[in-house]
Amino acid sequence: MNTATLQRLGSAVEAIHGAAMAPETWPQALACISRLHGSDKAMLVSDPADERASSLAWPCGFSASAVAEWRGVFRYRDPWEKRASELDLRAGVAAIDTDLVPDRELLESTFYCEFLRPLRIGRMCTGRVFDRNQATHTVTNLSIYAPRSKPFNEESRDLHRLMLGQVARAIALSDRLHNTEQQLAATLAALDHLPTCIVMLAPGGEVNFANSAARRLLAEKDGLMLARSESLRGTEGTLRATCCRAHVELKLRLGRATGKCPDTSIRTASTTCVPRSGGKPALILHLVPLSESSLLARADRETAALACIIDPASQTRLAPEVCRQLFAFTPAETRLANNLLVAESLQEIAARTAVSQLTLRKQLQSLFGKTQTRRQSELVRLMASIATTP
């Protein structure tokens, strides 16, 4: 990814996790996601026929009348939606318009002629945030729309797949934080089972609580760690970056989020990247201040802010046993497939793992043969469809 795309990606992740804390900001988050694709129209919507939870519908770039028209009439004439339902897309799988419906079929449809064309829409990149196999969430889609002149491509698909995972985690986190207002103890237990690393920060910046995922990551002392001191009573320690230069920036951001920083009276949310060793992708740290009226902020172990730590390298992983049963992958081939999932090139993998590029190319050809794929992008899409979040 180029620098501009990385900056937009960081803004999108920050906005998504901000929406987890304040759902009314989903339109702004969708605008950030749209900009990743050079677009200004998006929709996050759940299936209104699914009664397992309340219906979700957040548009971006659509008028209220267009949304009402789509939901009332044209959704049921949408060939993209119909085909996605027939394929029963799984959560985390992204698709572009031509994957679903041939151009000619779309252009001849009533949906395109009467709804899309007046809105100057002719392209879509979509994916399932949640599928029908989730017991606690309705079927939910995240879709980006663009004019006919701006087709989506493989990079669009890969970016969208990353966003699907982030949105799913944000919605899950939002659900659990909503329950916080009902029962603090139950929420702490729920946070402890989240795959996302969650840390609660006191007004002085000390860590009041870290869920299991966060404790495991911090115990590695690679990028971030807990610094303990005898002077800190009743806390787990302070959050510290293992790189001295990064810690200076981290300390400033922690102060601004918790109110400890003397140069500002307004606590602010922010997102930063924390470098790690060994060529691993940087951790993404998102800091969100809590309002004083929040139950967490008034709890016995008062909390001023939440920190969400995202490890790009562990968002989705392939279980060795699953790979062995489905494709007869060797352990080395599974490791290569997992490295390809986090968008590393063979050259980068070779440099980090000390395995020669020649060996990696042979393993890649074996992966193609065992999965009946021909290109690396096809292989990654297939692997993403069976990967799980640890």
Image: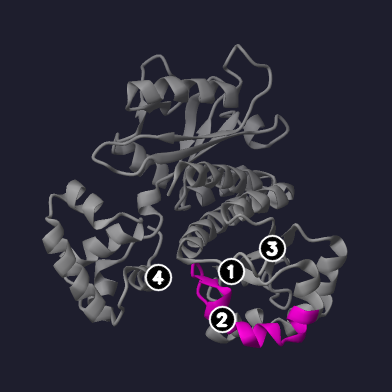
Measure how far apart labels 1 and 2 are at the Cα level: 10 Å
- Label 2: which residue? 100
Task: Work out whether 342 lies above or below 262.
Answer: below
Sequence-first disc among 1 and 2: 2
Dot 1 and dot 2 residues touching (CB under 8 Å):
yes
Q: What's the residue type where badge 1 is placed?
A: Thr
Q: Secondary structure at mark 1?
A: strand
- Label 4: which residue? 381
Q: Residues within 10 Å of mark 3 (few under 14, many from 20)?
A: many
Dot 4 and dot 3 residues touching (CB under 8 Å):
no
Residue 260 location (% of width, % of height): 57, 17
The reply, left or right, for residue 130 in relation to residue 194 is right
Q: Residues within 10 Å of mark 1 (few under 14, many from 20)?
A: many
Sequence-first disc among 4 and 3: 3
Q: Quadrant of the C terminus?
A: bottom left
The circle on residue 43 is 3
Q: Nearer the viewer, residue 301 or 218?
A: 218
Residue 288 location (% of width, % of height): 59, 35
- Label 1: which residue? 126
Sequence-first disc among 3 and 1: 3
Sequence-first disc among 2 and 3: 3
